[in-house]
Amino acid sequence: MESKISYRSWLVWGVAALFYLYELILRVSPSVMTNELMSTFNATSTTLGILVSFYYYAYTILQLPCGIILDKLGPRNLLGLSAILCVIGSVLFASYDTISVAQIGRFLVGAGSACAFISCLQISANLFPKKYFVILAGVTNMMGTIGGLLGGAPIAKAVNSIGWHNTTYALASIGIFIAILIFVFVPKRITKKAKSAIQEESIIQLVLNLMKNSQIVLCGVVGGLMYLPISAFSELWAVPFFMAKYGIRSQEAALASAILFIGVAIGSLVLAILARKINSYMKTIKMGALGAAVLFIPLLYCEFSLYAAFGFVFFIGFFTGVQVINFTCAQNNSTSEIAGTTIALINCIVMLIGSIFQPLLGLLLDISWNGKISEFGVRYYDISCYKYAIMTLPLCLLIACLFSLFIKETINKENE
């Protein structure tokens, strides 16, 4: 019976993780389409940053509703509907050359993606022993970063071969297949306790109580600042930064995002295991934030080969992978019955910070723009513009390290 339960748990988590991997591909794919999108929509960097951020507007707004629905009703219908929304949004995004329609499409993709990550962690909290949560959180993050990896160079190659419209249509067709898997293999409800736990207090009161918990909110803020190398750099501005610094094509520059995601994938798991080994989540988080911040400086301001730069990107990603431990710290300040709502609140804060910084970096690029226009008729930003904008990221990582000093160690709670 044990092996049966274990197999079922892994199957349910695996399908949810596959959807998370898929939505990451959709999330990061615009990063290798920047020139094409700016040309199609006649957009500036600020406009493009806002377009891409429409994903985050929906994603952030729907975090708490998705968490509450997960805890009350279970994952199957929510995940299935979400996959369908991703398909519809992708088709809309690629079907019209109008910026307003593209914004609606990205908004729907963000809405469909909102429950992906929190579903994986909610399933982990309810179907697996508590002490394994941080490892499963690391593996979940690894699945997401593999999606980010696939959304880099492979999508760039597809864009160069068949165009960004057809590439997006192909991604939409994959979403249909994943929706079928969800409805077939994911159960309607994964715990009987979740429904009664939500009914014991009003939903509004439940959310307010979580927001009054300073430890949970701090975990969200630190997690959001530490996620910026992914949300604000890798998912949008890394490719044009490397194109400007090294004079390479988007397909080659996309390797930078891919390498960062590889670093995150490995770091998420290795640093989660390290935290268990040294019996301290907080020491591991501080090390990760400081390590990523320090490595950004030579990446921006030192002159070395492209391959050496990729090495720095890998280790920035590796240290950024520690960000997922913030979800474990927050969950240890809550209960498995409301795991979806707790994780949703943290993810809401994380993505809200990301949605602010994507257009903010675009705005900083426009502020530092020297008036040059590229051969495609769009603004050309030289390397000094990117240095000016991206320097905000290591500063945010240092702030995250400072804020983490106020988060209490929770690893011992897992053994109580």
Image (cartoon, rainbow, N blue to C red):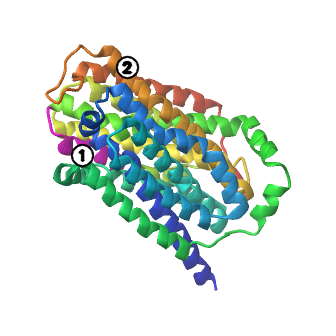
Looking at the picture, does residue 381 appear above or below residue 177?
above
Whole-angstrom CA distance, mark 1 to mark 2, is 24 Å
**From this viewpoint, is residue 331 visible?**
no
Q: Report the span colored magenta.
A: 247-263
Percent position (x, y) of residue 54?
47, 38
Looking at the picture, does residue 324 appear above or below residue 81?
above
Q: Which residue corresponds to mark 1?
A: 255
Percent position (x, y) of residue 201?
85, 50
User: Is residue 160 rendered to the left or right of residue 272?
Assistant: left
User: Is residue 384 rendered to the left or right of residue 198?
Assistant: left
Tag of residue 364: 2
Disc 1 residue type? Leu
Looking at the picture, does residue 77 appear above or below residue 345?
below
Looking at the rendered structure, the secondary structure element under dot 2 is: helix
Residue at x 30% of width, y 39% of height: 313
Q: Quadrant of the C terminus?
A: bottom right
Percent position (x, y) of residue 287?
48, 37
